[in-house]
Amino acid sequence: MRILYLSNLYPPYVRGGAEYLGEEVVKELVRQGYKVAVVTTVPWPSVKKLSPELRQEEGVDVYRFYPLNFYHYLNASKFFYPFRFLWQLINLWNWHTGYVLKKIIHEFKPDQAISFNLMGLGFNVPRLLNKLKIPHTHVLHDVQLLHPTGLFIWGQIYRSWSMKVYQKITGWLFEPVLTVISPSIWLLQEHQQRGFFKHSHIRVLPNPVPPFQATPHIKTTAEPLRLLYVGQFEFHKGVFWLVEQIKRLKQRNFILHLVAVGQKSRVTELKHLIGEDNRFVVHDLMSQSEIDALYQSSHLSIIPSLCYENSPTSITKSLLAGTPVLAVNLGGIPELVEEGKTGWLYKPGDSDDFAKKVSWCLKNPAELLKAGLTGSRVFADRTLEKYVSQLVVSKVVKH
């Protein structure tokens, strides 16, 4: 069976956990005997990249090309609103992507297609696949079909007429998708209440836990305790808010490790905010095995996002590593954290609630170890093998 995997980003080009998960899904598909081809984008190096370049990457055919537009998806922050608006218009129906994809499909002849994030590749992909009669499963990872930024920021209202127009267009473009997979109930409901996917087969299928690339670590209550943040160094991820809150704590029996994932455009700003406070360690570049080692040796992971998250990989990896989490109560996060058993939730933007809970955690390291032991069992059955098997099966059901 031949499977076409489509995503705007594919390692080494990443922004977050969805790209790493996509890579693991592709590798598992290959392990299970499927013939897989990846179609993804590459930043602009030259006019030659307008045509797809086929390379063998770890046994997988990977087609990389630059979808014709004003800039590459990863470079959006460098451009002002007028260019971003025009970029979004082209992204809704990128004729160049359609042309390239037709050529790849003619060459590869897929039986099925799986897509993750299509922002930057082109939202016309679902209608093209439908026209070519290729069964298509789309896996949701954020709210990019509901808002051009792919983000819902806490405290902001998204009910403008322009958003309604945008959602009408994207809803129509994704209407032919045969099967829609959502990792969280929250994310699926956000789409359904706006009229999306009325004719698709819909499933909630929690993300698998990527395999660890480090050996287990035995934790003790010895100080300093290790706190951990893994994610983008961006304001909407709450990392700057987190540093500000931690700096206010009087306790000094801990070290907070800050690990950058994806683009690291604000490392300098973050270090400036930290100043001379030696309770922080900033990691600019780390391999996956080094990050895994931190997950397994830490006492508490913190997820301070200021945007509505779907199903953060940082939570599932942390819990499987035996490290409980302190997370903001937003989006799909409460579906992953059992209050008082595998972690703790705090009210979004509430400095007092956050300080109270993190201080309690620092005073009760034995409770952290206990919660970590409980959490390590919760996602033990969320294997990549099971996930991929269900993903493939779910796509072949006919309307």
Image (cartoon, helix red, strand yellow):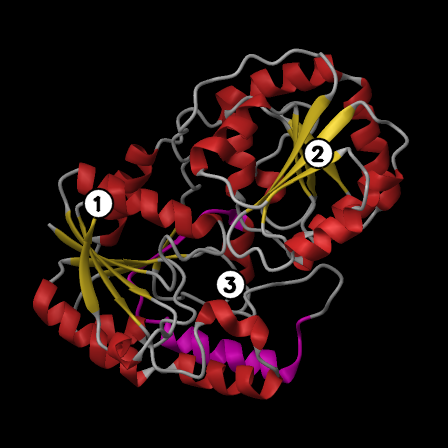
Q: Amino acid at mark 2?
A: Leu
Tell me if residue 388 comes above or below residue 376 in the rendering.
below
Q: Amino acid at mark 3?
A: His
Crowd around label 2: few <14 · some 14–19 · many ≥20 (10 Å)? many
Tell me if residue 297 comes above or below residue 240 in the rendering.
above
Q: Which residue is mark 1?
A: 58
278 vs 237, left or right, is right
Q: Is residue 148 visible?
A: no
Chain-order first, disc 3 or disc 2: 3
Q: Which of the pair 210/252 is nearer the observer?
A: 252
Q: Quadrant of residue 227?
A: top right
Indicate which disc residue 191 carries: 3
The alpha-carbon separation of the residues under discs 3 and 2 comes to: 36 Å
Q: Quadrant of residue 210?
A: top left
Q: Which residue is mark 2?
A: 256
Residue 262 image offset from top left, x and y in percent: 50, 53
Chain-order first, disc 1 or disc 2: 1
Q: Nearer the viewer, mark 3 or mark 2?
A: 2
Instruction: Tell me the magenta residue range.
Output: 158-185
